[in-house]
Image (cartoon, rainbow, N blue to C red):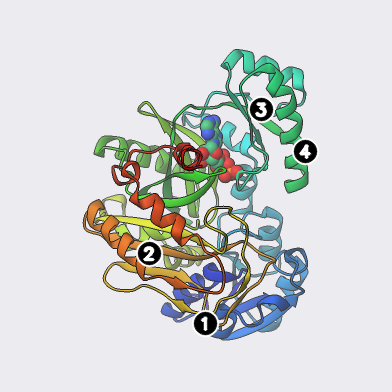
Amino acid sequence: MFDKVLIANRGEIALRIHRACREMGIKTVAVHSTADADAMHVRLADESVCIGPPSAKESYLNIPAILSAASITGADAIHPGIGFMAENAQFADMVIEHGFAWIGPTPEHIRVMGDKVSAKKTVIARGLPCVPGSDGPVDSFETAAAVADKIQYPVLIKAAAGGGGKGMKVAFSKEELREAYQLARGEARAAFGNDEVYLEKYLANPRHIEVQLLGDHHGNVVHFGERDCSIQRRHQKVVEEAPSPALNAEEREKVGSLAARTAKLLGYRGVGTMEFLYEDGQFYFIEMNTRLQIEHTITEMITGVDLVREQIRVATGAPLGYTQQDIRFHGHSIECRINAEHPETFLPSPGQVKQYHAPGGLGVRVDSALYDGYRIPPHYDSMIAKLIVHGNTRNECLMRLRRALEEFVITGVDTSIPLHQRIIAEPDFINGDYDIKWMEGWMKRLQ
Ligand code: ADP
């Protein structure tokens, strides 16, 4: 087992990883920018190293600074968390070359899956169904138009290096495609330094269903069921639940075993998630995330498994030690992503938290690095807390979520708590009757 792990991240996820390490008897090293000197994960870690100024480019994305921090503190392993360096294959390579263990999949898996065009090719070759689209990158408007004629409008132009919904544009006609194609390329170039794009049929009313996977270094792979992340705004997840209210036992088993089988064929190790769109009883692979995900928490609640602990354990080379049959599911879990932003205009609201009171009680979990008086820096992501609840049934879970949101107090900054309260009071949400376009349609109807 590792003696000391460096956590190359910030915020609630750094704290989440610190907690798993402490429970495993592993010492932690926090790295932080000058803006995060007072952060909770820095206070709780055994050691901390300042790695640069507030800009992420000069701190959390600064490879030499992170590797130096690992060297001087004598860490054995580096956990990249979520975002920042988590899907940077070059960083993973360098971590390994410098003699540290990398708590993640092989750099090769990160590379292949990080490029969505090569990811789709790789999984199609192993029998996974994907959304119909271009066979590879589309390098001119004429090619895009020819593909669109074949698969028929509406189409979606997506960035090969995409993430966070960036570089994605819909076109309902050839005229729209001309502009959307240029816009998507420009956005992809600005966001990822790579303007390669591809085309997919824009599905009308799918749900976003993803499968949590875990593989060890010995070829064993299991899945921990699915999550439904269809409540989205601008292709970004807002509320997630597990299991999906839209799947029956047969469909659940089908998507879980399809994903696990493919990951096994790939020799995948570590935690990872395969994302699918689900429409008319069909699953279509869209991408794989070769890292922990924000919403891993709801899977933990219904399986009782600490996924970060498992991730660290398999990174040491330990075998899984259990099979698919050993994984049991109990009850229902929902997560609300709480952001420091205005609940109606979505304008970011960094600043000082005056009062912070987290809800509690049976089945309530809050993953957050906030505390009274904490200053939310303006330089990073606006997510400040995850409220995760569990219930024996979906209805119990919904009632508990409503009660927990009522108890949550964060003053001094705007938060999205009122937005969550409105979403979960909607009959469509209560009935589990929503798809990826529901939330934006609902907001339009409210205007
Ligand atoms: P990113 O990596 O930027 O998050 P994804 O490929 O995971 O991009 O897609 C994000 C979201 O965009 C999906 O959850 C879904 O809501 C929407 N989306 C992606 N592909 C399609 C498609 N072919 N048709 C309709 N919606 C899509």
Residue to which mark 4 is pinned: 186
* Residue pictured at 57% horizontal, 16% vertical: 152
Secondary element type, mark 1: loop
Position of residue 229 relative to residue 280, above or below, is below
* Residue pictured at 41% horizontal, 43% vertical: 260
The disc label shown at residue 405, or none: 2
The outermost residue toward the front is: 447
Mark nearer the viewer, 1 or 3: 1
Crowdedness near tag 2: few (<14), some (14–19) or many (≥20) residues, C-alpha within 10 Å: some
Mark nearer the viewer, 2 or 4: 2
Residue to which mark 1 is pinned: 372
Give how far apart the Cα atoms at labels 1 and 2 are: 18 Å
The x, y position of residue 147, in whole percent, is 65, 18
Q: Quadrant of residue 332?
A: bottom left
Secondary element type, mark 3: loop
Q: Quadrant of residue 102?
A: bottom right
As shown in the figure, which amino acid type bears the numbered disc 1? Asp
Secondary element type, mark 2: helix
